[in-house]
Amino acid sequence: MFIELLKGLLVTLELFAVCWVFSIPFGLLLCFARKNSLKFFRFLIDTYIWIMRGTPLLLQIFFLFYGLPLIFPALQVNDRFLVGAFAFILNYVAYFAEIFRGGLKNVDKGQFESIKVLKISKLKAVFRIIIPQMLRVCLPSICNESVALVKDTALIFSIGVIELLTTAKNIVNSSADIFAYVVAAAMYLFICSLVNLAFKIFEKRLKFE
Amino acid sequence: MNMIDAINITKRFDNSMVFENLNFSVEKGEIVTIVGSSGRGKSTLLRCLVGLEKIDGGTIIIDGKKLVEDGVYAKSRDQSKILSEVGIVFQNYNLFPNLTVRGNLEIVKNDGKKIDSLLRRFGLYDRASAYPGKISGGQKQRLAIIRAMMLDPKIIFFDEPTSALDEDNRGEIVKLINELNSEQYTIVVVAHDMQFVDCLNSKIYEMQ
Ligand SMILES: Nc1ncnc2c1ncn2[C@@H]1O[C@H](COP(=O)(O)OP(=O)(O)O)[C@@H](O)[C@H]1O
Ligand SMILES: [Mg+2]
């Protein structure tokens, strides 16, 4: 049983890691693109974020896996994990972009003025001044969203990917013993606590003291 | 020879006029204080002279080079070159809080020797690894001054340098400004504290 659950856990972790690693940088990119683009593109980005945050993730997953190939048969992808991960990334990019937007708004206008008069290059300014100051503000929200992502990964069961929760459910169904649920719950708790801990440590380092 | 010539410059925000046909000039090596009550546009004038705001009309010449002529700005590359002659110490300093004292300087120019000597000279050497949030008001101001000096400007602008300081540090900043001036820096100071203005051996420009 443990071996099976561990296998399921591995799928869950994989999905989490892939989504996180792509959603964070693309969320940042989207947030900066939004700030620096023309009204029309800003409108497009806002619409995208609005749709992604205003419709259920489950619907988005269904749409990508079942819906899209009906309209564009060429977009039929058979790797369920891949499509699911893609749906997660599209969704979480929107959430992270929105969090980063809040962080960026919080950076004092004077910082940008100092950057300008001191002729600090854009790239250096973004990575060494702006992002660290944004993160300090929005790290708690990113932490929350990351923990939510750990738990949301279970939704990929809906297109037939067998991850931790599905594995536990299958074991419970065939053994008529709920112990597998308890173990799965403990595994989720452990991962979420680990994520929380990692963020707490990072937060301390970003105190600038 | 003038370091700064602002001729008939006009600045408005949307439809409110901040100043119109203003003339302002500073000779090389001078200290000029700009006085005038709150809201007259003193900070805005400084911001126009360092390129943070665009004027709506007039001419600005810095060290003989035209930044704007009759409301038309130089090419962006030339602007950047012309503006490298000016440095500014903001009223609230605008230090980078996530970088250490040294980091605030390194990000402008990674020149360890220069940074060390400036830190020593301004009494910040032993605070080099502290974050701006952990140093005193006077130290913050000195850091802001050093940071402005990193790019070797010929003019340094100060916006209300005494506003955030206590009595002791006020005397200190007078000394510093005079010292910088004796090293050929041209200095422009916005102030509304007349006691402070009296301590500076400066030409006074009143903003109406
Ligand atoms: N970014 C801005 N947008 C609109 N109005 C501004 C802006 N900055 C300054 N002002 C206005 O311009 C006037 C001059 O402001 P300021 O230059 O800060 O005055 P001072 O420094 O002399 O106190 C004020 O009426 C102020 O409200
Ligand atoms: Mg002012």
Image (cartoon, rainbow, N blue to C red):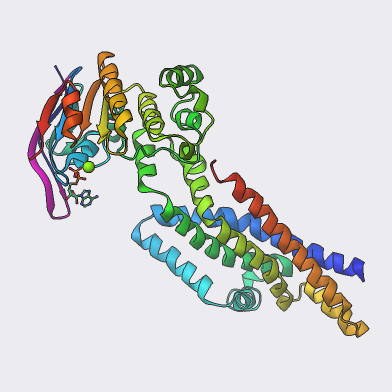
The rendered magenta stretch, by its main secondary structure, is classed as: strand
- Residue A135 as seen in the image, left or right of residue B109: right
Q: Residue at x 67, y 59 (%)?
A: A196
Q: Quadrant of residue A74?
A: bottom right
**Residue A42: image location, x then y, percent:** 39, 61
Using the image, determine if residue A1 lies above or below residue B138. Answer: below
Q: Residue furthest front?
A: B167
Q: Residue at x 19, y 23 (%)?
A: B200
Front residue (pair B190, A138): B190
Q: Which residues are magenta?
A: B12-27
**Residue A117: image location, x then y, percent:** 34, 35
- Residue A106 as seen in the image, left or right of residue A72: left
Front residue (pair A76, A159): A159
Q: Quadrant of residue B57?
A: top left
Question: Does residue B19 show up magenta in the picture?
Answer: yes
Residue B85, visible in the rendered structure: no
Q: Residue at x 60, y 50 (%)?
A: A203
Q: Residue furthest top?
A: B183
Q: Quadrant of the C terminus of chain B?
A: top left
**Residue B188: image location, x then y, percent:** 21, 28
Q: Quadrant of the N terminus of chain B?
A: top left
- Residue B1 as seen in the image, left or right of residue A99: left
Q: Quadrant of residue B147?
A: top left
Question: Does residue A89 show up magenta in the picture?
Answer: no
Residue B91, visible in the rendered structure: yes
